[in-house]
Image (cartoon, rainbow, N blue to C red):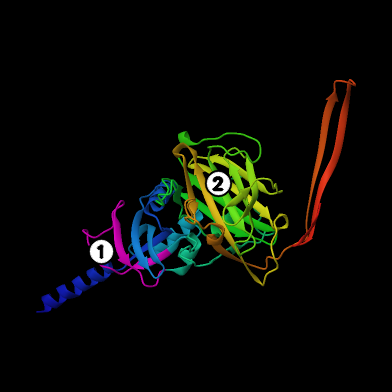
Amino acid sequence: MVRFFLCLLVLGFSVQALAESYWLGLGSFRGLTNAQHFRDESAQNLGQQLVIRKVTTHKGDYFRVLAGPFSDKSKASQKLRAVRSQGFPAAWMMLDSRFQSSSTKIAALTIEQTIEQTPPAEADQAIRQPVSGGERARLTRIDEAGTPIVIDGFVDESVWASVPIIDDFVVVEPDTLQPGTYSTKLRIAYSDKGIYVSAIMHQPEGTLVRRLSGRDVRDNRDSINITIDTSGEGRYGFWFGINLGDSLMDGTVLPERVFSSDWDGPWYGRSQKIPQGWSAEMFVPWGIVSMPAAAQVRSMGMYVSRRVAHLDERWAWPALAPTQAKFMSALKKLEMEGVQPRQQYSIYPFVATAFDWVDDQPQYRAGADLFWRPSSNFQLN
């Protein structure tokens, strides 16, 4: 009888040891394809195998990329510090209290369904921006003085690590609305001076299409484009695009899909080829766009699309295909605090030269175009 109770006690300790294991969360994604791309890249950078687990939370289903398991908290904490120092500042720790036998242990390529009633909120917020339905997304405000962003096309500034990733891009041309073949990691932030956009676009190097051209020239090449409804009510807006190779495009847009490229604004954009594909950064100053006065919290609509030239496809967030009747009134609503219209002015200097073959003499001209908008409803040219 004593031996029986001793066996039960030993078995109890064994089950308890197996029942609790610690895992490190590295990323959380809506789409399995994006999670697999992230897992493969992260595993190469960390030099270890990673797993993907499908979880159901109060926000919906996610695919989580995890490292582990670890038998005790101290080992997991030590690994967490190491992982964060290796370029994963948003990594978090989670406790798995399920019994893990050899038959249920997660393999490197296995997707397993689990339930999490209270997932770590800071992890989801640090990795992915909520974009479901008509929910408004609150953008990340950054301090340019403390964490400056250099618009060079490389998404390597430390501040980008604190900005949530948006990865819900689907194919809108043709309008299959299926997830894109490659992952797109979009980040949007803002400051007192303007709005920042960065994108890391995965793609095999041999498929990149780079063509140089003048401004506003549309061609089938890899590009990233944004449309901003600065009115917040679907009444007017602006669009900006940068192609791989740094050729810029911009213009205005009116309901529902009246695009014009007659307007050129002084904004900034750069692109770069990277080992995983290509990347881009854009900065649009508030001073170049029209916007009405608003309360402390301002709402704007946004649409982002990516052109994948070798597939002859366009992917977008949100899923607004050209075949849909609505566009401006259906853009994703973003919220920002403390953004107010400013007095706007732009100066475009120019020089020109010509040669008069009749009089056999050159002609020179120099000048500047000045645009000044002291309020949102008056402009002097």
How far from the left and from the top, in percent, is residue 134?
49, 66
CB under 8 Å between discs 1 and 2: no
Q: What secondary structure is marked by label 2?
A: strand
Up-down relation of residue 342 to residue 49 (above or below): below
User: Marks 1/2: CA distance?
Assistant: 44 Å
Q: Residue at x 40, y 61 (%)?
A: 24
Quarter the N terminus occupies: bottom left
Q: Is residue 182 left or right of residue 8?
A: right
Q: Is residue 352 covered in magenta?
A: no
Q: Range of the magenta residues? A: 93-119
Circle 1 residue: 100
Eye-nearest disc, 1 or 2: 2
How far from the left and from the top, in percent, is residue 50?
36, 53
Amino acid at dot 2: Ile
Q: Is residue 152 visible?
A: no
What residue occupies the far left of the structure in this picture? 1
Q: Residue at x 41, y 58 (%)?
A: 30
Circle 2 residue: 224
* Along the line of sight, the residue nearer the viewer: 70 or 39: 39
Q: Residues within 10 Å of mark 2 (few under 14, many from 20)?
A: many
* Along the line of sight, the residue nearer the viewer: 211 or 320: 320
